[in-house]
Image (cartoon, helix red, strand yellow):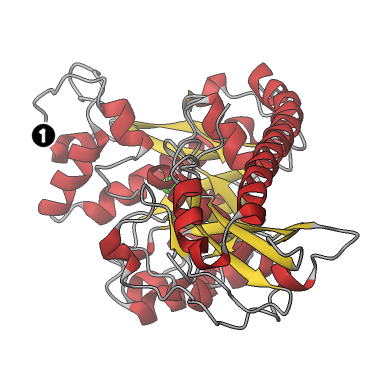
Amino acid sequence: LTIRQKNCPEARHANQLTENPFNNREVIGEKSLESHFQPIYSIKRTRTVGLEALARPMNPVTRNPINPCVLFREAGNHGLSLELDRLCRRRALEGFANFADEDPDILLFMNINTAFLNETAAGSNAILNLVCEFSVPPERVVLEIVENQVHSEDALMHFVSTYRNHGFLIALDDMGAGHSNLARISLLKPDIIKLDRSLISDIDTEFHKQELFELFIRFAHRIGVMVIAEGVETQTEALTCLDRGADLAQGFYFSRPLRAAEVEPRETPQRVGHVKQLLKYFQVAQRDKREAQYKSFAEMTDVICQLMSAADPEAYDRTLLSCLENFPVIECAYILSSAGVQVSDTVFNPHGVHPARRRLYVPSTRHTDQSSKDYFMFVTESQRRFITESYISGASGNPCITISTLTTDQTRCAIVVCVDIDMSKPVED
Ligand SMILES: [Ca+2]
């Protein structure tokens, strides 16, 4: 199994343990280790899709649990990694064999320590022999690979293609954590990507995590890869991940790792069905929130339009500036002529973008021709307002939308008032 300190279910379990002095050679020699199984759920189908085997070592004398992360590290220091790894895999299959027959579709997710993978280990067929011994078809086993532990890329490629040819499924584990190497996705062509807890924690409030998550999802789905959100610990994390397209979810919110005897593959916790229901309300609520937000944007732009219609064109910049001071969500604003040419500067909100960051981007200036922009082209007499999709502002680098409104100037000539709204701020309730 993998050696990880951070964010691993092993570590979370370990935090609750008091350290016991132990001899790792004895732990391995006495095979003083069992496997627990954390379910992976499809919320859409309200069912358990698979279970990840997690090592639970014990002190051979006292039978008290031992911190698995410490054991893995110690085993590595004493050249016992391979032995420990084999013991973990054996225990995983032994445990899985107990309930595998109850549901022939259920998968076993097994962590593979790839740190010491070399050509010999890759070609030894050790895992194939083991699954045969327990009469588990390879098609029911997912090998979870942490790609940043790998020393030999060739050996990893060989390992993956060998086991894939035997029918095993391949998952890339801990994606988004540590030094994930995105190039490996194209080399290994995994069936599944497991997005790491570090990306999932607080995803409901962190804009950058949400965007990164969606990026992974879009990318994975384009290349036909399934995505598991790992380490889901709260309801809002679960809802956010599912709303943004996670296929499967795993984590303490749904279920802790279970003893083999506790696993009931055909039972799903009430929470899974509950979250499925909640997701519908969540999505409607998100849409309502967005609509209410857009309504308030529209009211705001109406106020600005009124002021601009009465303003002296010579004083557009000053008038815009005084408007923006009242509306902190507006990042910048500018006025276009009826020909789509900018007749004001791009006026930034003094409370908005940091001046240092603004240096990276070049906002358009007076006289810039914007006539080919959608926010100019699509405002007409019959549709006086246009709201763009969210895009990255060339003026600030922030995700923004532009709201453009057709109105008139002092002389009753048409002008288009454009405001950019910073969308990186969370939606207010
Ligand atoms: Ca894993």
Dot 1 alpha-carbon crowd within 10 angstroms: few under 14, some 14 to 19, many 20 or more: some
Image coordinates of residue 143 in percent, x first then y, are 50, 56
In this rendered view, identify the residue nearer to me: 211 or 409. 409
Image coordinates of residue 223 in percent, x first then y, are 65, 70
Q: Please report the residue visible at 33 percent of the width from the left and 40 percent of the height from the top.
A: 7
User: Visible in this render: residue 138?
Assistant: no
User: Visible in this render: residue 18?
Assistant: yes
Q: Is residue 112 above or below residue 148?
A: above
- Queried on whether the Cβ of the residue with tag 1 lies below 8 angstroms from ligand 1, the answer reads no
Going by the numbered disc 1, the residue's amino acid type is Asn
**Which secondary structure lies at badge 1?**
loop
The residue that disc 1 covers is 23
Image coordinates of residue 48 in percent, x first then y, are 67, 34
In this rendered view, identify the residue nearer to me: 254 or 369. 369
Image coordinates of residue 396 in percent, x first then y, are 42, 64
In this rendered view, identify the residue nearer to me: 294 or 119. 294
Q: Residue furthest right?
A: 382
> Would residue 41 be found to the left or right of residue 170 on screen?
right
| Count of numbered marks | 1
> Would residue 66 be found to the left or right of residue 47 on screen?
left
Q: Please report the residue visible at 38 percent of the width from the left and 82 percent of the height from the top.
A: 154
Q: Please report the residue visible at 75 percent of the width from the left and 37 percent of the height from the top.
A: 44
In this rendered view, identify the residue nearer to me: 88 or 255. 255
Q: Is residue 219 above or below residue 304?
A: below
